[in-house]
Image: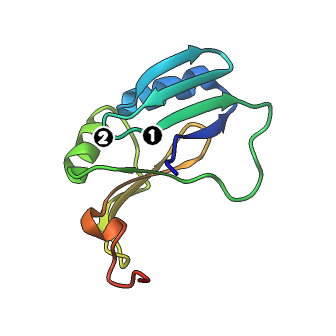
Amino acid sequence: MNLNQITIPSLDVEKATEFYKKLGLILIVDALPRYVRFELPEGDATFSIQQVDELPKGNRIAVYFENEELDKVVEELQQKGFQFDLLPTNQPWLWREARLKDLDGNPIILYKAGGNRKNPPWRIN
């Protein structure tokens, strides 16, 4: 099994599209104003945004994007005007994370985990 794509809801797909393009995703399907799909600079998974009339209540979808040059990427995004809730910080689960929100309030976590992403010291055999 392979993860193909993640689709998130948005009240304004056009504005969300610009946000994610500025974040570095590459637009590959443009069915505005209802739907778009991106590919990422690395890997095979895709990322979609779908128009909704109302955002889900309660816990939000958290989207994680991994980058080996996390600190550099965060600095570049800050220069583009992105506001972060958390600058790159080492976490107890051995990842380095930075956090921000997209225009619909979905948490975006940019992180660097290296080998600990799939093989932390507490991994079950």
Residue visible at 55% across and 54% down? 62
Is label 1 or label 2 in front?
Answer: 1
Q: Count the marks.
A: 2
Tell me: residue 42, above or below residue 85. Answer: above
Q: Of 50 and 11, which appears nearest the observer?
A: 50
Residue 15: quarter of image: top right
Q: Amino acid at mark 1?
A: Ala
Secondary structure beneath label 2: helix
Q: Position of residue 58 (x, y in %)?
A: 74, 58
Disc 1 is placed on an element classified as: loop
Is disc 1 in contact with disc 2, using a CB cutoff of under 8 Å?
A: no
Which residue carries the number 1 mark? 45
**Left or right, residue 76 beside residue 4:** left
Q: What is the x, y in percent for residue 73?
A: 25, 44
Position of the C terminus by quadrant: bottom left
Asked if 80 appears above or below 61 in the picture, the reply is: above
User: Counting other residues with Cα less than 10 Å from the Cα at mark 1, is it few (<14), some (14-19), or many (20 or more)?
Assistant: few
Measuring from the top left, give residue 41's x and y in whole percent.
31, 34
Which quadrant of the structure image shows residue 86?
bottom left
Q: Is residue 105 above or below residue 85?
A: above
Q: Is residue 27 left or right of residue 80?
A: right
Q: Which residue is mark 2?
A: 78
Q: Residue at x 53, y 18 (%)?
A: 29
In whole angstroms, how far apart are the C-alphas of marks 1 and 2?
Answer: 25 Å
User: Which residue is painted at 47% across and 23% down in the image?
Assistant: 18
